């Protein structure tokens, strides 16, 4: 990977330099936080769906409230399961795109090194 000539020396300044430039991507660290935040929002939605169904079952007379609450709980949990799968696939796609970018940077560095070796 190409490094600028005026890169600062030292451990702390190197980390700051990596944060200010796009030579080292932080996607793998940040995507875990984004993934768990999305899963927590999906879990809140699932708990809200279950709470709403229980509220409907308690409020309405026995047969009608229960007949309405059971399909709502089942449908809500199925939707939340599908959302979890979609969120996971979105996050994996995001990581794959950035991994391809990192691999291309390595290939570019290899090609540049090969050109320098074969140059007269």
Image (cartoon, rainbow, N blue to C red):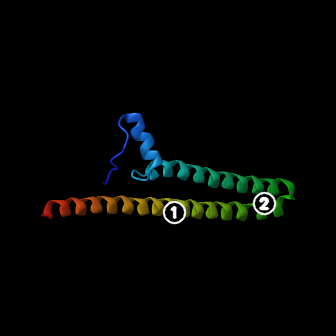
In the depicted view, which residue is nearer to us: 94 or 84?
94
Q: Position of residue 25 (x, y in %)?
A: 42, 52
| Residue drawn 36% across the image and 44% down it | 7
In the depicted view, which residue is nearer to us: 120 or 94?
120
Judge from the rendering whether residue 3 lies leftward or rightward of residue 45; answer left or right.
left
Q: Position of residue 102 (x, y in %)?
A: 36, 58
Label 2 packing within 10 angstroms: few (<14), some (14-19), many (20+): some
Residue labelled with disc 1? 90
**Could you say whether the residue bearing mark 1 is in a helix, strand or loop?**
helix
In the depicted view, which residue is nearer to us: 73 or 120?
120
Q: Is there CB contact under 8 Å for labels 1 and 2?
A: no
| Residue drawn 61% across the image and 50% down it | 40
Structural distance between the alpha carbons of marks 1 and 2: 36 Å
In the depicted view, which residue is nearer to us: 66 or 85?
85
Q: Nearer the viewer, mark 1 or mark 2?
A: 1
Label 1 packing within 10 angstroms: few (<14), some (14-19), many (20+): few
Q: Position of residue 108 (x, y in %)?
A: 29, 62
Which mark is first along the chain, 2 or 1? 2
> Looking at the rendering, which quadrant does residue 101 occupy?
bottom left
Residue labelled with disc 2? 66
| Residue drawn 44% across the image and 50% down it | 21
| Residue drawn 39% across the image and 40% down it | 14
Quadrant in which the N terminus appears: bottom left
């Amino acid at each position: 990977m190409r490094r600028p000539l005026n890169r600062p020396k030292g451990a702390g300044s190197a980390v700051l330099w990596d944060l200010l430039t796009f030579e080292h991507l932080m996607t793998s660290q940040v995507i875990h936080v984004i993934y768990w935040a999305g899963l927590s929002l999906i879990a809140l939605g699932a708990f809200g769906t279950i709470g709403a169904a229980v509220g409907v079952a308690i409020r309405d007379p026995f047969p009608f409230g229960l007949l309405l609450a059971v399909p709502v709980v089942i449908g809500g949990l199925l939707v939340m399961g599908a959302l979890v799968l979609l969120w996971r696939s979105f996050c994996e796609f995001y990581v794959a795109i950035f991994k391809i970018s990192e691999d291309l940077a390595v290939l570019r560095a290899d090609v540049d090194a090969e050109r320098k070796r074969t140059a007269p």
